[in-house]
Image (cartoon, grey):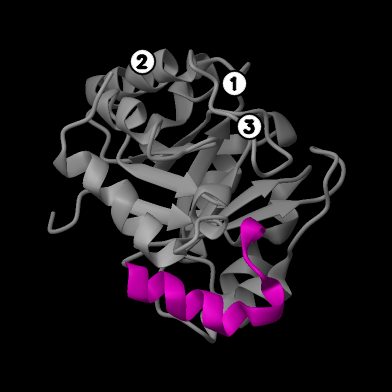
Amino acid sequence: MANPIRVAPSVLSADLGRLADEVQMLEGGGADWIHVDVMDGRFVSNLTFGAPLIKALRGLTDLPLDVHLMVMEPERYIEPFAQAGASVFTFHPEATIHVQRHLAAVRENGMRAGLALNPGTPLSMVEEVMDDLDLLLIMSVNPGFAGQSYIGWATDKIRRTRLLLDQHGSGAFLEVDGGITPDTIGAAHGAGADTFVAGSAIFSAPDPAARIGELRDRFKEGVSV
């Protein structure tokens, strides 16, 4: 794989009034994916984006759009988000009943299928659907708001998740979201993660494009737990 490590800036922290400029900056900084947090005010208390933003982003970039749904009944969004241009469709297993059916539907609609696990959600929630996963997202904060601090014991969960993926011979991406900064990304990477969502750490930096490079430099330095 030419680029085994992926940095996925979250537009939850972007200036949406300057969306085209923000996307151009992310591309120039070397972002691999663009992460879109979708919240419905039910699964989490916040309310954010939907298909119109995904469609707008797709018109601005060819980068993969990594969509994370923190919503109830995520199956209602599979077709609309696929039509809007989403590349990865990740949802929480607690938010629906027929998890395997919906993972299959995500793939049938041309997207990668992912599941997200909250800090308190056990890995056993995904063991029966490992063959249906293209991505497994470990939340290193409780979802709902940007700018939270990395939960230290999430590192052990990342490590156990990497072991689970390897034991099943899975090629799924192992993504981490929550409190990812230059100080925490090394621990997550050392535990086995390969894809990293960062919002506030990028967009609040004096030079956001340079911050993407700084995050990537932590891999070159071999920083780990």
Q: x%, y% of residue 23?
A: 50, 76
Q: x%, y% of residue 110?
A: 45, 66
Q: For mark 2, what is the residue?
A: 160
Q: Is residue 94 left or right of residue 122?
A: right
Q: Nearer the viewer, residue 168 or 117?
A: 117
Does 9 appear above or below 137? below
What is the quadrant of the N terminus in the image? bottom left
**Marks 3 and 2, Cα distance to the nearest angstrom?**
18 Å
**Marks 2 and 1, Cα distance to the nearest angstrom?**
13 Å
Can the viewer see residue 133?
no
The amino acid type, in three-letter code, at marker 3 is Pro
The amino acid type, in three-letter code, at marker 1 is Pro
Mark 1 or mark 3, whichever is nearer to me: 1
Q: x%, y% of residue 40?
A: 82, 50
Residue neighbourhood size for the residue with mark 2, other residues' Cα within 10 Å, grouped as few (<14), some (14–19), many (≥20)? some
Per the picture, the main secondary structure of the magenta-coloured stretch is helix
Displayed quadrant of residue 15: bottom right
Mark 3 or mark 2, whichever is nearer to me: 2
Q: Which mark is residue 93?
A: 3
Q: For mark 1, what is the residue?
A: 119
Residue at 83% across, 52% down: 47
- The range drawn in magenta is 12-29
Residue at 61% across, 78% down: 19
Q: Secondary structure at mark 1?
A: loop
Q: Is residue 161 left or right of residue 137?
A: left
Q: Secondary structure at mark 2?
A: helix
